Image (tube, rainbow, N blue to C red):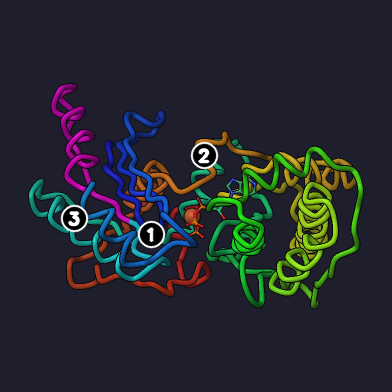
Amino acid sequence: MIIFGLEGTAWNLSAALVDEQGVIYEKSATYTPAKGGIHPREAAQHHAEYMAKVVGEVLAHSRQQGLKIDAVAFSQGPGLGPCLRTVATAARTLSLRFAVPLVGVNHCVAHIEVGKWQSGAHDPAVIYVSGANSQVLALRQGHYRIFGETLDISVGNAIDKFARSVGLAHPGGPKVEELARESKQYIPLPYTVKGMDLSFSGLSTAATEAAKKYDLNDVCYSLQETAFAMLVEVTERAMAHAEKREAMLVGGVGANKRLGEMLNIMCEERGARFFLPPRQFMGDNGSMIAYTGLIMLKSGATTPLAESKVRPGYRTDDVTVTWA
Ligand code: ATP
Ligand code: FE2
């Protein structure tokens, strides 16, 4: 079975073909804001502009190889409204053109499913951290239940905001990681875990303030250590509560080596296993949508045209996991 998948909830327009064995082909076009953070309408314009090129290249590959596409999967939400509409329009067109089913995929669930596929995790507690989301989840009775999540902004957004405030280009995550490696001097910053939930907004502002007084490398290091320790604490409690022997890290911030290292230490200490998917599957990618579409289709879940409208606020725990 071969599925065409289309992602474009925010910064990355990406189309891919996958089958059960793996990724057959993927093509992406990245939107980078000239100044500041992501502009929803600018990002959507970018996706519209590159749609024909990105989709066209994947379809050309499929024709050259004589492949038959069995369904078109697309990210239905959550994400930026204008971006989602651009993606959904293209996906509907392709589904009609090839006369194959349409499968609307939850973007967050796709991060989780591609992570399990690519890392070999079986039933993990999931740490999903990106530019828009910070959630600790585990599968229970047919839903990815959210055990803890951010009460304000995501950890990725907190790091990106801080980075912009000190003059680093968006997205600041990778650059902050690089600078943090040059420091071992911890500056105390606000650590906010409330029950199982997290707050990163005050931490981001405090880091911006600290950067006026302290060495930037030390502030980057302290920001990471504080934010990641908060995530490790909530993950450990979710694992104990949900009785999970595995943990898996996914989402764009999951590319951060230090976060993976801290989670790995926590897992080793509790005799649990830690799973980290390859980096190419961490940030937004078309393959994760195609793969999730594939397992959804195999379980009989498709999306009629009438139900294909975009869902900007689509919650992870709204999805009934029919394929587990
Ligand atoms: P979602 O809709 O899932 O929230 P997203 O649009 O935020 O997705 P992702 O690719 O999942 O996209 O995540 C992007 C985030 O990942 C950005 O905030 C970026 O700074 C962060 N990031 C990328 N690499 C690193 C890194 N090495 N360290 C920390 N953060 C990183
Ligand atoms: Fe994402």
Return the disc, 2 or 3, that comes first in the chain's sequence: 3
Give the distance between the C-alpha atoms of the residues marked 2 and 3, in whole angstroms.
26 Å
Up the image or down, 40 lies above or below 278; here it is below
Return the disc, 1 or 2, that comes first in the chain's sequence: 1
- Badge 2 marks a residue whose secondary structure is helix
Amino acid identity at mark 1: Thr
Determine which residue is flagged by label 2: 117
* In the image, the residue with mark 1 has its CB under 8 Å from the nearest atom of ligand 1: yes
- Badge 3 marks a residue whose secondary structure is helix
Return the disc, 3 or 1, that comes first in the chain's sequence: 1
In front here: 279 or 19? 279
In-image side of 230 versus 153 (left or right) = right
Amino acid identity at mark 3: Ala
Give the distance between the C-alpha atoms of the residues marked 1 and 2, in whole angstroms.
21 Å
Determine which residue is flagged by label 1: 9
Determine which residue is flagged by label 3: 90
Horizontal and vertical percent for residue 93?
A: 12, 55
Foreground disc of the pair 2, 3:
3
Dot 2 crowding, Cα within 10 Å, few <14, some 14–19, many 20+: some
Write down the region rendered in magenta. Answer: 51-74
